[in-house]
Amino acid sequence: MSFINKINSAAKITWKILKNTVSAFSGWTGGIIVGYLFKWELKILNFNKSYVKLSECLSGVIREILSTVNTDYIRLMPNARGIPKGIDAVTFGYEIYIKGIFSEENYYDLRLILHEMVHVRQYEEKGKFFFKAHYGFGYVSENFSYENIPLEKEAREFVNNQWKKFEEKYRTTCVSSV
Ligand SMILES: [Zn+2]
């Protein structure tokens, strides 16, 4: 390897490290900053609306599937303003902003809730600060693809794996046969 080639490959490695460091840093800080701004934007846009709680029965079913999630703290805001296109709901800690109406009898909504509950668990595990950092980093490192953010993938996979069990438990305990 000639001297100039050595410099060249050293420069390439340095560039790669620098690029990864910058993207990691921008993902973390971007996630934290954008996360907080977005949370406050939603709070302000929806200041005149009220939150609703999960029913006791649904809370119980959620705890059977996701035992660590503290369902007592969860508050939903259906018909929320300010949710981006292509997204049905946004979760900040225990607050879940839902684009449309929410009905426990609608299985699409129940599936959505199960998905958001996985985000609540991620919040509880990582803390609100690191959740945002992790989310932003995932977004940047997956080339700005929402679908491929690892925390989103985890939530989707969890719902795919647990939906049948969840739906059956819900149907047998919460839906009266009368
Ligand atoms: Zn999600």
Image (tube, rainbow, N blue to C red):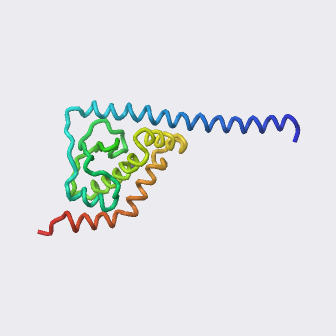
Q: Quadrant of residue 42?
A: top left
Towards the viewer: 117 or 67:
67
Residue 79, position as x, y percentages in the image: 24, 42
Residue located at (34% from left, 58% from top): 66
In the image, what residue occupies the spot 37% across and 52% down? 118
Q: Residue furthest right?
A: 2
Residue 152 x/y as whole percent: 43, 50
Q: Is residue 90 in view?
A: no
* Relative height, residue 18 to residue 59 (above, below): above
Task: Using the image as rendered, state which of residue 144 and residue 64 is in the foreground.
Answer: 64
Where is 76 relative to 81, above or below?
below
Question: How far across and how far down the image is residue 176, in percent?
Answer: 15, 66
Position of 55 with respect to 113 (left or right) is: left
Of residues 129 and 78, which is closer to you in this image? 129
Q: Answer yes or no: is residue 176 visible.
A: yes
| Residue positioned 53% across, 33% down in the render | 26
Q: Quadrant of the N terminus?
A: top right
Please state, as top left, top right, bottom left or bottom right, where the C terminus lies in the image: bottom left
Please tell me whether residue 116 is drawn above or below residue 41 in the rendered image: below
Report whether 46 appears left or right of 12.
left
- x and y percent of residue 162 in the render? 37, 63
